[in-house]
Amino acid sequence: MSLNTEDLLETCRELKDIFAKRAAKYDAEAIFPVENYENLRKAGMMGLMVPESHGGMGANFYQYTRAAGIFAQGCASTAVSFNMHNIVMGALAEVDLSSVEGRFGQIMKNFQDWAFAEAMSGKVFGAALTEPNVGFHPGSLSTTYKKVDGGYLLNGKKSFVSMSGYADYYVVAAVPEVQPGGEIPVVSWLVLPKDDPGIEIEEMWNTMGMRATVSNNMKLKDVFVPRSRLFLGFEGLVLQKLANEPHFVVGGFTACYFGVIEAIFNFTVEHQKRRNMAGSDIPLIKNEMIQTRMGEMSVLVEAARQLVYHAANLVVTNRGERETNAAIHRAKYFVGEIGPQIASLAIRACGGGTISKHLPMERYYRDIRCCGLMPAKSDECLWYVGKQAFGIDINKHSETYW
């Protein structure tokens, strides 16, 4: 029985309304939205991307895009941090093991079964993918692992680790101490429990936006990772996945930030409906300049919607195709660049009162400014799409920004 999209979105809207009531407090105090995650758990959302065969909802990428956008309308930090969990679950769910036989197939299946079971029990997976002075460029990582009896020993430092101190597991991107050579660097994901004594969280998160993601630095000192917790049981899967199918790492962020754009637009409409023209009882929405401003915002929002939903649908029908991957990057660029513009238009239309902390607009503005910094950054998106336009093979490591 396939997941009904409208039923899913109705549940998401109910959660969004709950999240919205807490968002200002989480933002002001830069604290993790623990209560929101309890709501997500109770609604079964840790299994949103887990296949139905493993007890989950089995959402496809379009359904996830819609859900993430709705969550972000209530609390962007909740949506963006939850996206990290779904990068992991979504990537796993897309791996078809039906044709992989023998010992290798069993190793992969064991990992997949374990991860899905943990998610279905309510466990949260975070992702430690970026590093200081490196950002999200897995081909240039300095966090290393070496093989030891029974597994691997991990050392390094990660940055922007969302849900730091809260997630039950962290998927850490790392490279072997000695690369085996070849055109594509070996980059692997290893899964760590949050209570490993070799993990140290540096509590330094105090940012302009996305404050409740609590994305601190993480130091790793001689962390032992059992062989069974190497992602899907194999080294070197990361760059191949990112190059061929970048939609979760890139498009998941796009979905969240498009939700912030929708929140900005909806707030502006409702705010203007409650106001009158200065010194009169004439509703402000009768003012032609206000109507024009809303028309401009509406065109931009709808253009973003079409790009985002088109890309998400292409992932469902043509995952990994060149045009699909280019569409994912077009949407990310547009949302990252147009989002702050829409927020500025909204503040101009609504007036100076909207910069007050008692209204959500100033939080929306700060949060949407962060979109262009998330993978893939705006310039990287343009670079990617430009290469695709010239027919350059953007799946090759030498041509990618990873």
Image: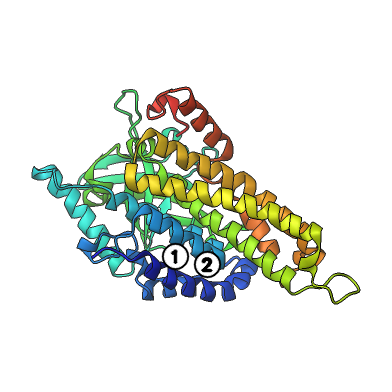
Question: Circles 1 and 2: CB distance less than 8 Å?
Answer: yes
Q: Position of residue 384 (x, y in %)?
A: 49, 32
Q: Amino acid at mark 1?
A: Tyr
Of label 1 and label 2, which has the lower sequence position?
Answer: 2
Q: Nearer the viewer, residue 174 or 35?
A: 35
In this rendering, the answer to whether 26 lies above or below 261 is: below
Q: Is residue 287 left or right of residue 14?
A: right
In the displayed image of the protein, which residue is found farthest to the left? Answer: 102
Q: Assign a secondary structure to mark 2.
A: loop
Q: Callout 2: few (<14), some (14-19), or many (20+) C-alpha neighbours within 10 Å? A: many
Q: Callout 1: few (<14), some (14-19), or many (20+) C-alpha neighbours within 10 Å? A: some
Say the numbered circle drawn on residue 291: none
Q: What residue sits right under mark 1 in the picture?
A: 166
In this rendering, the answer to whether 164 lies above or below 313 is: below
What is the number of callouts on the image?
Answer: 2
Say the numbered circle drawn on residue 32: 2
Q: State the quadrant of the C terminus.
A: top left
Q: Position of residue 48 (x, y in %)?
A: 34, 63
The structure residue drawn at horizontal position 46% and vertical position 45%, both measured from the top left corner, is 250
User: Residue 4's quadrant in the figure?
Assistant: bottom left
Q: Amino acid at mark 2?
A: Phe
Q: Nearer the viewer, residue 380 or 143?
A: 380
Q: Position of residue 171 (x, y in %)?
A: 36, 51
In the displayed image of the protein, which residue is found farthest to the right? Answer: 279
The structure residue drawn at horizontal position 21% and vertical position 47%, both measured from the top left corner, is 96
In this rendering, the answer to whether 348 lies above or below 276 is: above
Distance from Cα at disc 1 to Cα at disc 2:
8 Å
Q: Position of residue 177 (x, y in %)?
A: 34, 34
Residue 159 seen in render: no
Residue 154 seen in render: yes
Q: Assign a secondary structure to mark 1.
A: loop
